[in-house]
Amino acid sequence: SKKKRQEPPGPRPLPLIGNLLQVDLKRLDWSLFNLSKTHGSVFTVYVGLKKVVVLAGYSTVKQALVNHAEVFRDREITPIFDDLTKGYGILFSNGKTWKEMRHFALTTLKDFGMGKRISEERIVEECHYLLTEFEQHKGKAFDNAQIVSYAVSNIISALMFGKRFEYTDPLLQSMVERDHEIIYLTGTAAIQIYNVVPWLGRWLKNWRDLMHNTEVNKEEMRRIIADLKETLNPDICRGFVDVFLIRKQSLEESNIMDSQYHDENLLYSVTNLFAAGTDTVGSTLRWCLLLMAKYPHIQDQVQEEVDRVVGSRQVRVEDRKMMPYTDAVIHETQRYANIAPLSIPLKTSRDVTFQGYFIKEGTAVFPLLTSVLYDESEWESPHTFNPSHFLDKDGKFIRRDAFIPFSAGRRACLGESLAKMELFLFVTSLLQRFRFTPPPGVTEDDLDLTPVVGFTLTPSPHQLCAISREGF
Ligand code: HEM
């Protein structure tokens, strides 16, 4: 009946441009969050002619992604996602490709220690390189964006290629820089326009830059893979790429030619993991250092806890349970920084009636993480950086259901355990050794928390001073 097929409400769209006048493409997540206050937690917007259903607030997002996991599972392959990976790999694939590549990536990365002791050793080793680099800049104002990203990308590189890069290696530098650029450009207003009017592409500088960066990236990744192939030894698997190549070889030897283990899926899975594993953790780490410099009384409490629990020895993952305040600060950084505000768009895998509204198969869906991490009915002071969100009255760490910066359901981030381990070890190691302050002549109030808005939210370019702490 007509009633049963009622579609989610929303602002009235205009011909051709849809609701483009009601949203700010430069801060789409906040515009949609505001619209949810008028139109409810499930509503429709038209980005040009493209219809999108927005899910807002913790209970709605959770109900969709977790309780209707099979429906809200497929990726919406926008024109730009298609340009980037042609439906291969993990991030922007669907069906058999996605299922097999996600499963393979998860099991292989776990076999190489993702989230376990072996990764801990690797991260601890990388902390030393990072600290040495900070040491060289100590006391002077500097922008830590690059070295933080290099350290973080070495963790995923070790899992995939079985090696780390020197921070001075031009290959590492260019891959990190280009990925950063790609992630930024993908979220710009120009590319969102391209997604609804793809023939505009060649006229848009952002699109041309994106395509150029993607091509160079692929070339470099192909060369790394070719080197690994040349030196492949099935008895000593160095990482993800080796395991993939061996699986591919053995399937080919068995004359199975239609498997998912082909060059394209290898190339795009590796580029996906490198990009998803670098910029995300890198910018969260930078948010954390910036917030520590801005709120010195919070930094004091973290350092008091680090000194009391760890002292001057190496921090280990198992220290975390004795460090509720530090744990709360890292969680609150992820909540407040909200680095993936729109998550990554999904589409419905079949017709569904959700919260009384009919949503047709193939409809694009935005699980609005901003509306979850800033949900006023879940957080006591959503707009303030407040580690108490994760502490009970006795100062013990508490989990919060609405803390889903890695999203939830079938598509949830597959690097969550690795990211959490990296964040804990990098943050504590840096704060054990250094005090972070604004540069001379800049006050804490001057430190700007306005993000640069791309596909992720990163801190605006800034400088901090890393001052050596007494005893180190
Ligand atoms: C602070 C760090 C990180 C954050 C906040 C984060 C967040 C996210 C989010 C929001 C998604 C989208 C989930 C969805 O579509 O519902 C995602 C997907 C993904 N993440 Fe992460 N991520 C982080 C670190 C990592 C790391 C370290 C890796 C690499 C090991 C990684 C690999 C991936 C992959 C491969 C996907 C795609 C999953 C799929 O489509 O099935 N992420 N991440």
Image (spheres, rainbow, N blue to C red):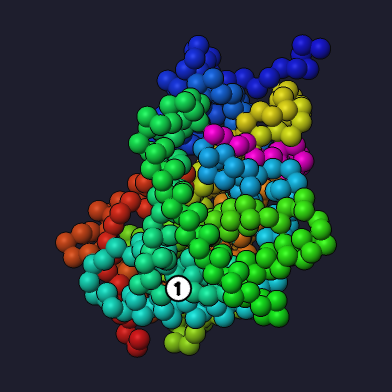
Q: Which segment is the magenta one?
A: 61-79
User: Toward the viewer: 353 or 100?
Assistant: 100
The location of residue 177, given as percent across then percent down, is 38, 57
Query: Image quarter for residue 393?
Result: bottom right
Residue 272, quarter of the rendered image: bottom right
Q: Secondary structure at mark 1?
A: loop
Q: Nearer the viewer, residue 55 or 308?
A: 55
Q: Amino acid at mark 1?
A: Phe
- Residue at 22%, 64% in the rendered image: 439
Instruction: Decide: is 294 above or below 90.
Output: below
Q: Is residue 332 visible?
A: no
Residue at the spot 25% in from the left edge and 53% down from the top edge: 446
Residue 78 among those drawn in magenta? yes
- Residue at left offset 77%, top offset 41%: 70
Q: Is residue 453 magenta?
A: no
- The residue under label 1 is 165
Quadrant of ligand 1: it is: bottom right
Whether residue 316 is visible = yes
Image location of residue 301, percent across then percent down: 42, 71
Q: Is residue 315 left or right of residue 353?
A: left
x then y, percent, for residue 19: 49, 20
Q: Quadrant of the N terminus?
A: top right
Image coords of residue 30 (percent x, y):
46, 35
Q: How many numbered discs, if any?
A: 1
356 lies above or below 431: above
Choose top left, top right, bottom left or bottom right for residue 6: top right
Which residue shows up at 35% across the image and 88% down it? Answer: 471
- For disc 1, the neighbor class at 10 Å (few under 14, some 14 to 19, many from 20) is some
Quarter of the rendering occupied by the C terminus: bottom left
Left/right placement of residue 214 relative to residue 236 reads left
As drawn, 171 above or below 384: below
Q: Nearer the viewer, residue 307 or 135?
A: 135
